[in-house]
Image: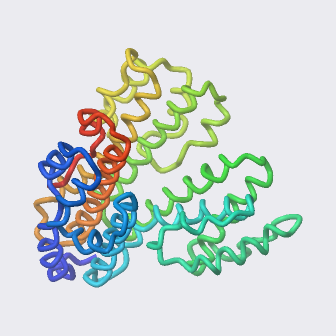
Amino acid sequence: MKQDDYIGASISTRINEKNLLTRSDFERLNDLDTIDEVLNNLSDTIYRDSIDELSNAQEYEEILKKELKRSYALLEELAPDNKILNYMKEKYHFHNLKVMVKEIIQGKDYKNLYMDLGGLDLAFIKKNLIKEEKKDSFDFVLGDKKEEDLPREEKYLSFAKVALEKFEESNNPQDIDLSLDKDFYQMKLKDAKEMDSEKLIDFTREEVDLTNLVSLLRVKSQDESLDLLKESLIDGGFISRDKFIDYFSYDINRIREAMTNTNIGKYVKDILKDDRNIDEMIMALEKVIDDHLTDFTIDSKMVTFGPEVLMNFLISKEIEIKNLRILLVAKQNNLDKDLTLERLRKSYV
């Protein structure tokens, strides 16, 4: 990937960065009392056109969806190739696969839950999933083809079929998420390697470690078995699956000590404390995973031009939209302002 290919795209993206909301913007919005007040204040921002089209303030989710789609469409026009977008869209691909598999096994229509961002031919995938689901057993095989050689839709179809097959074997919907989460991170790692970015590869491996730590704590919190942890753990991080399996018998202090000199040590040292309950630690770690995303953008802030500039913008926009959702939900439910401020994710600007 040549940095020079991104000069024009980087210049245009930097211009669009000026429209991102700052931390002080979020603090000001948090001081307001109602959804209407928040939306009125956002009318002077990039969100104004979507707000003008809104018939009911309670339908604010439409504003957020439109801005996310607009941002991805902008980068699709600017980017000289699809590699960054492929990496960033994986979360939407696998969200849609989860919705689709559950839609099929439950015989319900979840069309409102799909994210119209991935760009996959979901109709093709669903048609073939239904065809397989009606059979007594799955006969989908790769044959002589390797998974990476499959056409794009067939590749994701294979992921969905495996998840559906696991459900058929266990009748446990949790197995759908476990199966697809593993494939999700393997695809992210594959995308990062295709971008030939050591920084992005390391960042993704750290995200795998943080996710595995959440799985470990969740299994311990729910007093589940070691077998469930083994099934939940994802390959590819800096910390091996075997070490996480060893941590299953550790208390929280010992887990924190084991994490001290790892890549994610700085993120978890103040979270893993025996005076906090595990559910609180899990919530804090889920926030840390988002803050870890922002740290990637901050670390790349001095890059003049290159794929990092475009990726930083998309990550920053997604964090911005998540923060707006947190704020709007808080106003809708009259939640404490200090608590809401604590829940906000770290901002790029």
Q: How many marks?
A: 0
The quarter holding residue 5 reads bottom left
Q: Residue at x 25, y 82 (%)?
A: 78
At x 23%, y 54%, the residue is 38
Measured as percent of width and height from the top left, residue 289 is found at 36, 45
| Residue 77 placement, left or right of 180 | left
Q: The C terminus appears in which quarter of the rendering?
A: bottom left
User: Residue at horizontal 37%, vertical 74%?
Assistant: 83
> For this rendering, which residue is in front, 261 or 160?
160
Residue 263 point in image, percent of width and height: 32, 40
| Coloring applied to the structure | rainbow
* Residue with the most extreme right position: 136
Task: Please state the horizontal and vertical placement of residue 137, each as a whole percent of the image.
Answer: 86, 64
Q: Quadrant of residue 144?
A: bottom right
Camera-nearest residue between 128 and 340: 340
Residue 220, located in which quarter of the rendered image? top right
Relative height, residue 1 to residue 38 (above, below): below
Residue 237 at x, y percent in the picture: 44, 46
Asked whether, in this view, residue 276 is left or right of residue 341, the answer is right
Residue placed most toward the observer, 89 or 151:
89
In the figure, is residue 265 to the left or right of 234? left
Instruction: Say which quadrant the N terminus sits in.
Output: bottom left
Q: Is residue 132 above or below residue 332?
A: below
